[in-house]
Image: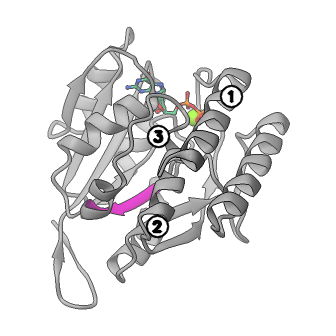
Amino acid sequence: MSLINKYGDVKNISIVIPTLNEESNIKEVLPHIPDFIDEIVVVDGNSKDRTLEEILKFRKDAKIIIEKPEGKGAAMKTGFENATGDIVIMMDADGSHDPREIPGLLEPVLDGYDVSKGSRMLPGGGSADITLFRRFGNKLFVTMVNRMYKANYTDLCYGYRAFKKEALERMYCHSKGFEIETEQSIRMRKAGLRVKEVSSFEAQRKSGNSNLNSLRDGLRILNIILREYFKP
Ligand SMILES: Nc1nc2c(ncn2[C@@H]2O[C@H](COP(=O)(O)OP(=O)(O)O)[C@@H](O)[C@H]2O)c(=O)[nH]1
Ligand SMILES: [Mg+2]
């Protein structure tokens, strides 16, 4: 089942979900994906647990791609290349992104925006998952990106987003790790895309631990902010 926007155009919607050992969390996500989603693309980093069995339990039609665990960014790139929808949503598999927010996330893109970007910092949004250190880093980096790239973001390192397929193609992101959201945010600005932020609540990862290392990944984020600035 697809969606029809206010101009009467039929839109096919894909969701791309990166997974790395998320067997206990899949049940928090997949059963709640709305029926109007046409395609679910899972990019799995060769999980050592029963992630894939869990996925197939809930969605036999999921398109599953298995690759080396080279990072979330690398997984997203593969997922975007394999998603066929007119609109592509990215969301995590650990239960921190609520599938019930999907209609609200899609709305700006159905209305004509190129990108809809979940923000934990807008009224109505929030996070039960972000540590104090990560909150500080995110604040610092969002301020840098806003100043350096003349943007107006309230959040940066948050990967609950929806894109027009053509918008994704115009961004050409190559990040391998958790700097992917920052690279996207910079590139959507550089490409002059129409971006709308919508409030989102990030729940705690339901089970297991984050794969993110604040220091290592913080440095990768800083690196991409500076590198993109000096690149034409
Ligand atoms: N395929 C794949 N998925 C990954 C990799 N690293 C993280 N993920 C997934 O990316 C999402 C976000 O990762 P997470 O560890 O929760 O990071 P955090 O939300 O920033 O703390 C989750 O769905 C992970 O399973 C990877 O190397 N490969
Ligand atoms: Mg997480």
User: Callout 1: few (<14), some (14-19), or many (20+) C-alpha neighbours within 10 Å?
Assistant: few
Of residues 58 and 119, the one nearer the viewer is 119
Q: Real-space Cα distance between discs 2 and 1?
A: 26 Å
- Badge 1 element: helix
- What residue do we see at 32% from left, 63% from top? 167
Residue 224's quadrant in the figure?
top right
Q: Real-space Cα distance between discs 2 and 3?
A: 16 Å
Decide which of tag 2 and tag 3 comes sooner along the chain: 3
State if disc 1 and disc 2 touch (CB < 8 Å): no
Dominant SS of magenta comes to strand
- What residue do we see at 44% from left, 75% from top? 194
Tell me the kind of residue under disc 2.
Answer: Ser
- Label annotation for residue 92: 3
Q: Position of residue 58 (x, y in %)?
A: 27, 37
Say whether mark 3 is within 8 Å of ligand 1. yes
Tell me the kind of residue under disc 3.
Answer: Asp
Of residues 211 and 127, the one nearer the viewer is 211
Decide which of tag 2 and tag 1 comes sooner along the chain: 2
Report the residue marked by disc 1: 219
Is residue 33 in view?
no
Rendered view: 103 above or below 93: below
Q: Quick check: 192 left or right of 31?
A: right
- What residue do we see at 41% from left, 64% from top? 191
Counting every numbered tag in the picture gives: 3
- The residues colored magenta run 161-165
Tell me the kind of residue under disc 1.
Answer: Leu
Residue 208 highlighted magenta (yes or no): no
Report the residue marked by disc 2: 116
